[in-house]
Image (spheres, helix red, strand yellow):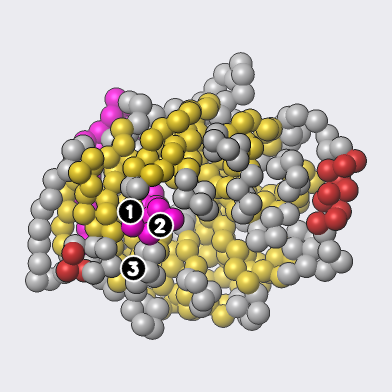
Amino acid sequence: MTRIVDAAPSRACSIRACDWFKGFVLACAFSAASASAQSNMAPAGGPVYDLLVGTYTTGGKSKGIHVYRFDSATGQASPISSVETVNPSYLVVSRDARHVYAVNELPGDTGPATERGGISAFTFEPSSGRLTFVNRVSSEGNDPCYLSFSPDGRYLLAANYSVAADPGGSFAVFPLLDDGRVGAAALVVHHTGGGPVKGRQDNAHVHSTVFTPDGRYLFTQDLGADKLYEYRYTSDSRGGLVSPTPEGYVPMPPGSGPRHLVFDAAGRYAYLTSELAGTVTALQYTNGRLTPLKTLTLAAPGFKGKNGAGAIHLSADGKFLYATNRGDANEIVIFSIDPYDGLPKLVGRQSTLGRTPREFAIDPTGRWLIVGNQDSDTAYVFRRDPATGLLAQPTRLDIGSPVDFKFTPSS
C-alpha cells in the first residue's frame, strides 16, 4: 500500500494503491584473441574523467565525497579533492556536470528514528575537480539511499530506505532550482506493508526510484514489501507528478527483497537484483508494465554462506550485465545478454578482493570497471574486456568506506 502526501504547504492528498587466490575469474584466462581485442581498444592516449566517490563517514574513515582524476588509457586514478558531508552513500551528477547531489544517509541502524536524512547539493568545477556545498534539505524520511533525476530534469527523487518502521519506507520528489539548489520536497509517497524475513522486512524499505526509458513511468523497488511499485509520471505538478497505475505494483517472490533495477537502452527489458534472495531477474517492459521472464541465482553452485545482491549495471553496448553479491560471496557476477530475447547467461565471476562490495561503475570508454569494498576500505579498478565482459588486472585504491562511484568528463 502507498500513501502519497503533497509536501507543498498549501496542499495535501492521500491516495491508496494495492500493496555474493579468489580473484580469479571463472571461465578461462583471456585468449590471445581477446587480448588483441583489448589492445585494439586501447589508444595511445585516452580521455580523462573525473571520478566521484561517495562514502560512509560515520565510522570516521572518510569525511565525505572524494574526487579523483581518472586516466582511461591506463586505468589510474589520482586524488585531487574532497568535500565534507555526512554519509554521502549515493551520488548523481547533473547532465551539464556542473552540479552533484548526494544523499546524507541518516540516522542509520542505531540512530534515533526522529532524525531525518538529507539531500545535499554541490556545485562542481570539472577543470579543478572541486566541489562546493550549496544547500541541504530534509529527505523527508530516514536513511535515503538512492537518487534519480526525472526525465525532464526538473526534479530529483530520493528513496528513503528507513530502518525504522516509523516513518517507514518512502520516496520524495524535490524540485531543482535554477541555481542548482534543491528545493523542499514537493511530494512524499509512503509505502506500507512488509514481508516474511524478520529483521529485514518488518516494514517497507524503498531502495530505488527508476524511470522507464520512455520517461512516462516510475518504478520504486521496495525491499521490505517485495514489490515493484508502478507510477505514472507527469511533469505538470497540477497532475500530481506521480500517480499509481491501475495495476499498482509487480509482485516479487515473498522474502526476495527487490533492491535495484536497470533498463536496457531500447526500453525493452529490465534487470532487477533481489538482495535477500541473492538473485537477478530479467523482466520485459511494455507500456508501463514489467513482466518477469527469468530469475537466476548469483551464488556459485555448491556455495555455502550468505548472499546479498546489490548493485546492477549494463555495459553501454547492452551486451553484458554485472551485479554485486555481498554477504560471504563478495564478488561481481557477469552475464551476457541474448540480443534476441534479453535473457542473461552466466559468463563468469570476479572476486572484488574485499568485503561488502556495494556500488560499482563502468567508465565511459567501457574498458574499466571500479568497485568499492565498504568494509575493507578499498576500491579496485579492473580492466574490462569489451569482447568477453570479463575482468582482470586489478589496481587497488585505498578509500575509507567507499560506496558509490560516478564518472564525469574532465575539462
Instruction: Give the structural element (helix, strand or loop) at label 3.
Output: strand
Determine the CA span between mark 1 and mark 3. Answer: 14 Å
Quadrant for the N terminus, please. Answer: top left
Residue indicated by mark 3: 155
| Rendered-image quadrant of the C terminus | bottom right
Q: Whole-Å distance between the Cαs marked 3 and 2? A: 16 Å
Residue displayed at 33% across by 79% down: 177
Residue under the point 65% across and 75% down: 410
Residue closer to the observer: 293 or 401: 293
Label 2 sits on a secondary structure element that is loop
Residue 340 lies in the magenta-colored region: no
Is residue 113 visible to us here? no
The numbered disc on residue 214 is 2
Magenta span: 187-216
Extreme residue in the right direction: 32
Residue 189 as seen in the image, left or right of residue 325: left
* Residue at point 27%, 63% (across, down): 234
Whether residue 65 sits left or right of residue 398 in the image: it is: left
Check if mark 1's residue and mark 2's residue have beta carbons within 8 Å.
Answer: yes
Q: Dot 3 surroundings within 10 Å: few (below 14), some, or many (20 or more)?
A: many
N-terminal label among 3 and 2? 3
Q: Where's residue 150, x and y in %? A: 37, 64
Residue of label 1: 217
